[in-house]
Amino acid sequence: MKVIILAREADSHAAPVKWGLEQAGYQTACWSGPGWTEDQQAAIFLDREIEIALGPHPLGPGDVLWFRRPQPANLHPQLCEADKAFAEEEYRWFHYSLAYLPERLSITCINPYTSSRLINNKSVQLQLAGTCGFNVPRAVMCNSPAALKSFLQKNRGRTICKAFFPHVWKKEASNGMAVTEAFEISPTKLPADHVLTFAPAIYQEMVVKQFDVRTVLMGASVYSFALHDLQGALDWRQNAWQGKVKVKDIETPVEVKAALTAFAQKSGIVFGVFDFAVDMQGQWWFLEVNEEGQFLWLEELLPSAKLMQRFLAFLTSSADPSQSLEERTVHFPALADYLRSTAKQDLRSSDPANARLVSTER
């Protein structure tokens, strides 16, 4: 078997995972997506036997395809401006053909593209979470001032606003940046109606919390970590990037684990990073799931998490189904080994943006 990671070589998670697999003797490669260069050229042969080639990497039965972070198509530089829109559309549909087909063959997809595209929708996540037994905060997703005001009138408690997707504004002059974060809103502090139509947003009942939890689902295995923001911020993500969040192993309540199992079965995902808020009564509230989510940063802050070894064992679980995921972790290096390696030093010097494993993702 071989493992193909759909991501750039320098991706902060693809790089250590690829290195770890190679150290354990597995054939692995990164492929960022289709484009004009030779290593980005792909093909689907539809004959008696279906064959897929991702650049120089043929995909076959028993192989593993991890949809980490596929990149937009790399268009040929000689394309004239009038043809770029056509080429972009053709590459988009070619990408879909490459992405949806493997799950119909004997190729392990993490996650199946059908499932990952469905579950990336916030409305689907929240609706499905409710049907699986999670506590889910009330919410409205809208670009309508009237809808938001109606929601605020019904939801007398505290309310937060958050983006559908993270975004970074770079300030070229000062070399600074601004990042989307969740923030609290109230009926008396709303901007003018027309401002509310500039971009849609998610407005959600605020969970007054003791702490946050990030849970990593790998097949039937579940690993949860309490996140205690040392500054008590509403949104812990930026503080985690600055090392201001304390990470601790935590048991996943039985009812939460049962809901996670149901969620995975109904959505079709086999891997995902879930975010919860734990309220003052100890109840877990589902916030969201990112099926491409960041998780190795947890091990940077808590080496005993062993998430890299566990993920490598999970990716290659079909190679030895007689052993459990935990039993197979001994075959793989830890994240600390990668961080000390020359491979990590090379990545840091060639791509400083990926020096750390955290990001602004949800």
Image (cartoon, rainbow, N blue to C red):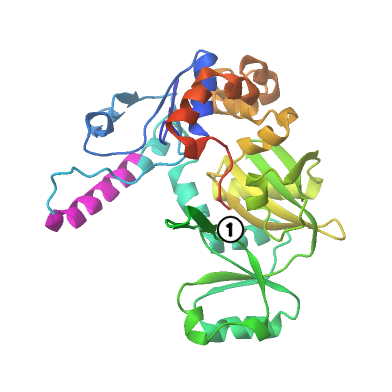
**Front-lying residue, 334 or 289:** 334
Which residue sits furthest right?
A: 281
**Front-lying residue, 67 or 159:** 159
From where the camera sits, is residue 70 visible? yes
Q: Which residue is mark 1?
A: 125
From where the camera sits, is residue 221 visible? no
Q: Residue at x 67, y 50 (%)?
A: 239
Q: Quadrant of residue 152?
A: bottom right
Instruction: Tell me the quarter of the image containing the N terminus.
Output: top left
What span is in magenta?
A: 81-98
Would you call the spot at circle 1 few (<14 residues within 10 Å), some (14-19), or many (20 or more)?
some
Q: Quadrant of residue 341?
A: top right
Task: Give the tally of numbered discs.
Answer: 1
Give coordinates of residue 96: x percent, y percent. Answer: 33, 46
Give coordinates of residue 309: x percent, y percent. Answer: 63, 24
Vertical order, 268 against 60 (above or below):
below
Vertical order, 361 against 106 (above or below):
below
Q: Residue at x 27, y 33 (%)?
A: 40
Determine whether, in the image, residue 278 is placed left or right of residue 236: right
Amino acid marked by disc 1: Gln
Vertical order, 160 against 119 (above or below):
below
| Magenta residue check for 84 | yes
Determine whether, in the image, residue 85 is placed left or right of residue 317: left
